[in-house]
Image (spheres, rainbow, N blue to C red):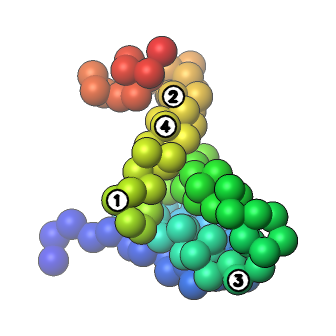
Amino acid sequence: MTKLLVDTCVLDLATWGQACSAIFDIKDEMGIPAGGGVHNAVAMWRGLKKKMGPQAKDPCVAAACASSVAIGADFVLYGPVEDAQYIFPAVAMVDTALSQLVMERGGEPVANHPRYRVG
């Protein structure tokens, strides 16, 4: 194996925080890309639709994916392709916001970065 990706394994809401912490730790200690299927936290949330309504699922999935990117995930496993319409804008927004930090530290986002495509 030459290019590793570490999936920190989100099973439900209870493991989501642990998985996000693991993303940070793996990147910090080992320097290898880490991310995960944070959509699992929402998919396994049994009371979501009953307590918050059916409209709550899509924003929760988008927020879960965007939050993992905000803490440093290098990739997001997001579930069914139909959810891309909610997830891609949310992740692009976070990537764009974080790109300012890169620039303030002397870096430059790659040419096809969302910063140059969403604004």
Of badges 4 and 1, nearer the viewer stands: 1
Say which residue appears at 68% left-offset and 63% top-offset: 54
Q: Earlier in the sequence, mark 4 or mark 2?
A: 4
From the image, tell me which residue sits under label 4: 89
Decide: few, some or many residues near mark 4? Use Cα within 10 Å; few <14, some 14-19, many ≥20: some
Indicate which disc residue 96 carries. Answer: 2
From the image, tell me which residue sits under label 1: 81
Of badges 4 and 2, nearer the viewer stands: 4
Q: Give the camera-side residue of 95 and 50.
A: 50
Residue 109: horizontal and vertical position, in percent? 38, 26
From the image, tell me which residue sits under label 3: 46
Of badges 2 and 1, nearer the viewer stands: 1
Left or right relative to 38: residue 112: left
Left or right relative to 27: residue 19: right
Q: CA distance from mark 3 to mark 4?
A: 26 Å
Residue 62 visible in image: yes
Amino acid at the residue labelled 4: Pro
Q: Residue furthest right?
A: 51
Left or right relative to 41: residue 31: left
Q: Give the camera-side residue of 85 and 119.
A: 85
Q: Earlier in the sequence, mark 3 or mark 1?
A: 3
Decide: few, some or many residues near mark 1? Use Cα within 10 Å; few <14, some 14-19, many ≥20: few
* SS at circle 1: helix
Res 112 quadrant in image: top left
Residue 74: horizontal and vertical position, in percent? 42, 54
Q: CA distance from mark 4 to mark 1?
A: 14 Å
